[in-house]
Amino acid sequence: MKSTSTASHRRPLRASVAIVMAAVAAGAALAALPNQASAAPSTTFGASAPKDVRSIDEGIPVELGMRFTPSTDGTVSSVRFYKVSPDASVTPRSVSLWAANGDRLAQTRVSRTTSTGWISVRLTSPVKLTAGSGYVVSAFAKSGSYPTTRNYFSQARTSSTLTMPRNAGVYTNGWKSSFPTSTYGASNYWVDTEFTPSSGTSGTPAPSPATSSPATSAPKPSTSTSTTSAPAPTTSAPQPSTSTTTSSTSANGLMGWQLNSRNVGLAPFGLTCSSLPAYKGSLTPAAGTRISGVRIVGQLDLRNGDIIVERSCIQPSSGSASNSGTAAIVSNFVCGRDSCPVISDRSIIIRDSEIDASNVPASQIAAACAFRGTGTLQRNYMHGMGSGICFYGTGTKHDAIAEQNYVTDLRSYGSSHNEAATVRDFMVTGDNPNRVARFTNNRLDIADGNVTAGLFIQSLGDRIDTLRVEGNLIEGGGYNLFLNQPSSENGSYRDVRAVNNRFNSTGWGPSTVQGGPGWAEWRDNFRYNPSAPDARGAAVSAS
């Protein structure tokens, strides 16, 4: 998942979503907290089943949790999580309690169970919490399976003892348990504490769900690069033995202006394109395919959907990409028009990978995007192509998420049109009224030749109904950020927001608006100054 604070895992978009309607509808709101005669363990969500839970099977380990602040001193004796499936293999491997700075205060291994609903795990010893201090409670889903409710934390929530801030739900992908910092779509991942106030503050007694006994040792995560329990069919090549333990240079928690070629893509896993074995599967993988730890030569067509590509190198060779306006190294669109719908029922994820077109002559690659279509792109290093992330033909079903990607070294040829990122359409309809489009914490580096903008937002022939641009560094020639509604076309845009971005312009300037209503929100955008706190140089006003 997925990525740093957004309005976000990713998640980020998650693959393989099955809607699970809970039997008890009352659990969507925080549980009522009646007065008690003496202090007793209290929970945030009560004993009822959550409402409108989505069951996710992402196929890669992920730590999921919740940020909170107690209003009184107290202790946490147990951590609990909500489990949808009776499959014992999807039981989280461990639960943890963290200080806000990432120090782990407690970790307990979880025994596998076929029980569903709220599962309580007693800590080896109670952990003392301090009123007003921030904490995180989390569970490590080694199988990649977990419950979520989108937009639950779109605003802060408060019980009698705890406060959960806006975007309290946090996650981090990785092959071992680690501190979760990224957010996605204000999601709640349904991990909770049993908190006992020291002062006798009243609370809801903890329910008596199924329990799991603590293990005497912390979990021992796998270091293999192969994915776990991938759904059939799978065409992944044999996996290398290199450890995938994320190094200290991981992009987790970083803003766009903190990204480089060492903390995104393959490098944090100790991998390079040349170190990976060749991919032997189809370049048009079947739905359900998981591709991990391989080098793919050629153009990848993901039109069948429900596909995850991770820790892989996509490296086309000379002659494998064409100089045409619809070309892409990776795509999930099926026709040549910008408004063409994506036909797959389920979306795709590309993360922790490298897209490298440096082996292809500029004459063949200058008009091609690294990615074209819609999906979730996280922590990828893209270089050597004509353009980077192209959200064209996004249809009406899936999210369009670009999070912590580094796009650089664009190449032009003749009259090619080159941008680090482009959005041409994103319609919110009855097919999915909650779909999300955003660029969050990316670094978009653009060359001077044939470039109009780093992020080019243009409603060309169709609508852009919503888009959030936040936490990015956009640098280089042309305009850094361009918002356009062509008068000669039928397209339109609305609710386009730019918040907390950094601009390092060597061209026409940080931003411009040409046509349309302009920015729905423009806030906290600054010139990039690496020596200033939070890289904040001079403020940039809306055009």
Image (cartoon, grey):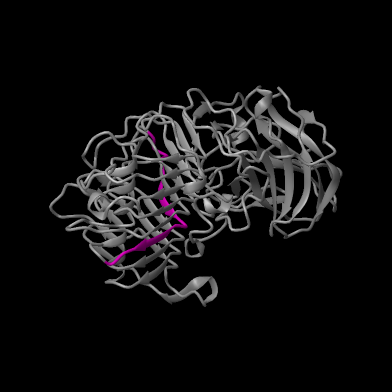
The answer to which image quadrant residue 411 occupies is bottom left
Relative to 140, residue 88 above or below:
above
- Percent coordinates x, y for residue 474 in the rendering: 38, 64
| Vertical comparison of 164 with 225: above or below | below
Closer to the camera, 13 or 199? Answer: 13
Residue 290 is one of the magenta-drawn residues: no
Q: Was residue 435 drawn as part of the magenta stretch in this picture? A: yes
Q: Quadrant of the C terminus?
A: bottom left
The relative height of residue 81 versus residue 131 in the rendered view (above or below) is: above
Magenta residues, start to end: 432-448
Looking at the image, residue 177 sits to the left or right of residue 443; the answer is right
Left or right for 175, reference 523: right
Measured as percent of width and height from the top left, residue 29 is found at 60, 39
Q: Is residue 421 above or below residue 50?
A: below
Q: Nearer the viewer, residue 494 or 324?
A: 324
Tell me the quadrant of the picture where the N terminus can be found.
top right
Residue 444 at x, y = what percent? 39, 60
Residue 352 appears anywhere in the view: no
